[in-house]
Image (cartoon, grey):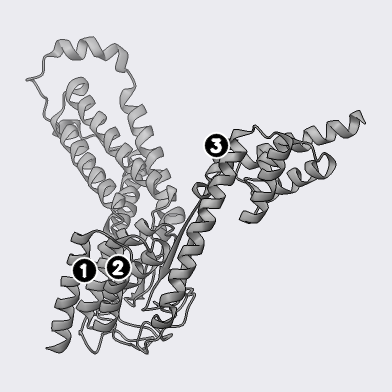
Amino acid sequence: MDMANGDVQSWLRDGVAAVKAGNKIEARRLLLKVVESDEQNEQAWLWLSGVVETDNDRRVCLENVLTLNPQHELARRGLEKLERAAQVEADARMADADIADTQAEDAEIIVRKEYAPISPAAAVLYPERQVKEWRYRDPTNLQQVPEVGVASVSTYDDVWSRETAVCGYCAQEIDEDASQCPRCQHNLIEKRYRYEKPSTNLHLFWILLAGLGQFFLIQALYAMIIERVLYGAILAGVWMVAFLILAVGVYYRQTWAHIGTIFACGLLLLLGVINVLLPLDFSTLEVQLTGIDPSIANFIGPFAQGGAGIIRALQMGTAVLALIFAFLLVTPDFDKVDEQLRAQLDKGLQYGSDYHAAARKYVQKGLLATAVLHWQRAAAKEPHQLLYLRYLGMTYAQLGFYERSLDTFNSALQFTTDSVKKEEFKQLMQKVSAKREA
């Protein structure tokens, strides 16, 4: 008996934890096991009322709580709320029945998100706050271009409802290998990097080049202060500037910087090898910097003995590493391919705001058809967001799809009770209608 009671308590504890975690299915399973084993368990009936699927089941659970404890205020208030909700729903059904004969049946997109209750009171009294749901009736039944999933069939016979490639600028149907749009005359072939984002190796590569530039800066200072020679400082300064410029070019993925780095590092190593095999003495050509206070060199000199050799070793080692990166690791980062500017969705986007931001970016580039696809997806993900519908309708109109534009604005009117916004969308519809008639 004690073991059975222990199981019941364990199920109850785990069931309550599942409710708080938002796992309604698991919570319902565990709490049903509790009430099947112990019909007098008031807490189990109370928590179960927050995770059952229908109002009738909730009513049964709360009535059982009141049977066990007639003074349970929370259960009583929950039942009263259920009665009020049932009356409101009945009135709504009657109103819907009155207008059902005058409305066409539109495709409906349902967006639903569940939240975990924070307390038994929230689970019992406010179950509707645990679930947010948007119902979107879209008379345009927006379709996407190929590779984009849709949930309905478009009533329009245009490029948005056919599986065909379209120009990213003007939405004109194009061939798979077209290099120019026959309608807007835009060039449809663009050179793009094979990999959109630079690799970690590329970041390390430009850091190596920047490091080489700093080593030459140190060499220039060493030549000026310790060795007090002019030409050595100038030569080191030239190398420093060259490698810093190459580092900036590599950072921005410029092909000339990649090729220039190979040439510069190769030349540096070649000069180093020549200097080892055939050491030349250029001391007679050097100009002494007599303007620098010799006391500085006398003070630093003991600490900088052999410094020139260490600096050159660091330069050679870094140049070897840079060449390895240039030949073996970062070449794909500079590889470009021809890509047709057809209308298509960006990969990796998740939220409506992501698609909206991408659409704005494409509008700035003049790629209106590509922007339309992103606003279509943004509106499908967040159909209550009037901003997305506004931009979508305006872009439809710019591309000449006036019927779709009007339907989109009409959809927006269904989502707002704000008189100012309603008037704004009505004015947009009037402008589009006038443009259609022109």
Q: Amino acid at mark 3?
A: Ile
Apparent side of residue 87 relative to residue 30 in the rendered image (left or right) = left
* Quadrant of the image containing the C terminus: bottom left
Q: Residue at x 35, y 41 (%)?
A: 207
Instruction: In the rendered structure, find residue 412 and report the number of the disc placed on it.
Output: 2
Residue 335 appears in view: no
- Circle 3 Cα neighbour tier, 10 Å, few/some/many (<14 / 14–19 / ≥20): few
Which residue is more in the foreground, 4 or 232?
4
Apparent side of residue 127 relative to residue 338 in the rendered image (left or right) = right
Instruction: In the rendered structure, find residue 188 and report the number of the disc placed on it.
Output: none
Q: Residue at x 75, y 44 (%)?
A: 30
Where is 53 relative to 141, above or below?
A: above
Percent x, y for residue 43? 70, 35
Percent x, y for residue 41? 76, 36
Element on which disc 3 rests: loop
Q: Amino acid at mark 1?
A: Phe
Apparent side of residue 44 relative to residue 155 in the rendered image (left or right) = right
Instruction: In the rendered structure, find residue 118 and report the number of the disc placed on it.
Output: 3
Percent x, y for residue 358? 32, 62
Looking at the rendering, which quadrant does residue 206 occupy? top left
Instruction: In the rendered structure, find residue 425 and report the number of the disc placed on it.
Output: 1
The reply to whether discs 3 and 1 touch (Cβ–Cβ < 8 Å) is no
Q: Tell me which label, 3 or 2, sits earlier in the chain.
A: 3
Q: Tell me which label, 1 or 2, sits earlier in the chain.
A: 2
Q: Tell me which label, 3 or 1, sits earlier in the chain.
A: 3
Please, which residue is most extreme toward the left here? 291
- Circle 1 Cα neighbour tier, 10 Å, few/some/many (<14 / 14–19 / ≥20): many
